[in-house]
Amino acid sequence: MERPAFRYLLCEERTDGIVILTIDRPEVMNALNHDCQEELCQFASYFDTAAHLKSLIITGAGDKAFAAGADIRMLEAACGIFSLNSRLRQALLTLENCSKPVLCAVNGYAFGGGFELALACDIRIVSENALFALPEVSLGILPGAGGTQRLARMAGIGVAKEVILAGRRLSAREAVQYGLAMKAVPLSGLMDETLNVARRILAMGPAAIQITKGLINAAGYTDPRTGQMMEGLGLAVLFETKDKAEGVSAYLERRRPNFSGR
């Protein structure tokens, strides 16, 4: 699949298989207007199917905002069918459910849809100046791109209610405290830290990453017995792969494994 052309997204495809996607609307704190959401949806489909891309890092342009939510002017004309056909929701579902690791480097404000975008990623690294909020209820609506569901699962129902219903903002330290971020680092070292995590993941077995990501996602909505049965089936599949044989041999021979994804 050929990479689409983007106006509001910068796409850096690195030789190590990591692609860095930057939301590039710094003049409006990287707010997600209609066109930007459409581009995110197109990119998510491209990333999911592009065999040469192994991992994704999402960030925002500038040093103030990751993404400051939806463009408020866009909401003036929004109607019910707008929500049902949300391109942002579709983009986040694609990123969440794709087989590849998705990380985000949150470099400032992550409000509304920006917070929801971060929640849909597998791993979140945040700068010390990051700030998180879901202010939609103050506009008479609600966070409709997965915010009510993902935040409640990750941080607990109590935290989700205070953030969404009472408009509480979470600092970078609080995001780490509530399990919403892996760590908070100085802004100057944010991308380096996120790249280091992405590289560590890519050193693992590709098939194992794919199956394990799906199992961890399923833990949010599957009962424990079914989840453990799925886990056993996933392990059985991996036991039959060349990567399992390579991983065990490399360990015994005290060398780095050379995984093939098969």
Image: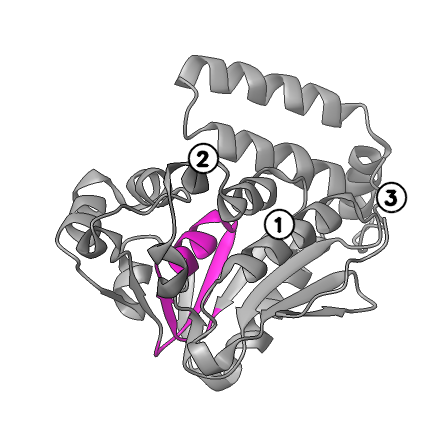
User: Could you tell me which secondary element the residue under label 1 belongs to?
Assistant: helix
Which of the marked residues, 2 or 3, is nearer the chain's N terminus? 2
Sooner in the amino-acid sequence: mark 3 or mark 1: 1
Q: Secondary structure at mark 3?
A: loop
* Residue that numbered label 1 is attached to: 41
For the C terminus, the quadrant is top right
Left or right of residue 3: residue 99 = left
Q: Position of residue 6 (x, y in %)?
A: 70, 66
- Check the image and report above or below for 179 versus 261: below
In which image quadrant can residue 198 be found? bottom right
Residue 181 shows up from this direction: no
Residue type of the residue flagged with mark 3: Ser
Classify mark 3: residues with Cα within 10 Å, few (<14), some (14-19) or many (20+): few
Q: The disc labelled 2 sits on which kind of residue?
A: Leu
- Asked whether residue 115 is drawn in magenta, I would say yes
Residue where numbered disc 3 is placed: 260
The region drawn magenta spans 106-129
Going 41% across and 56% down the picture, which residue do you hit?
A: 113
Q: How many marks?
A: 3
Which residue bears the numbered disc 2?
Answer: 84
Name the residue nearer the viewer: 44 or 196: 44
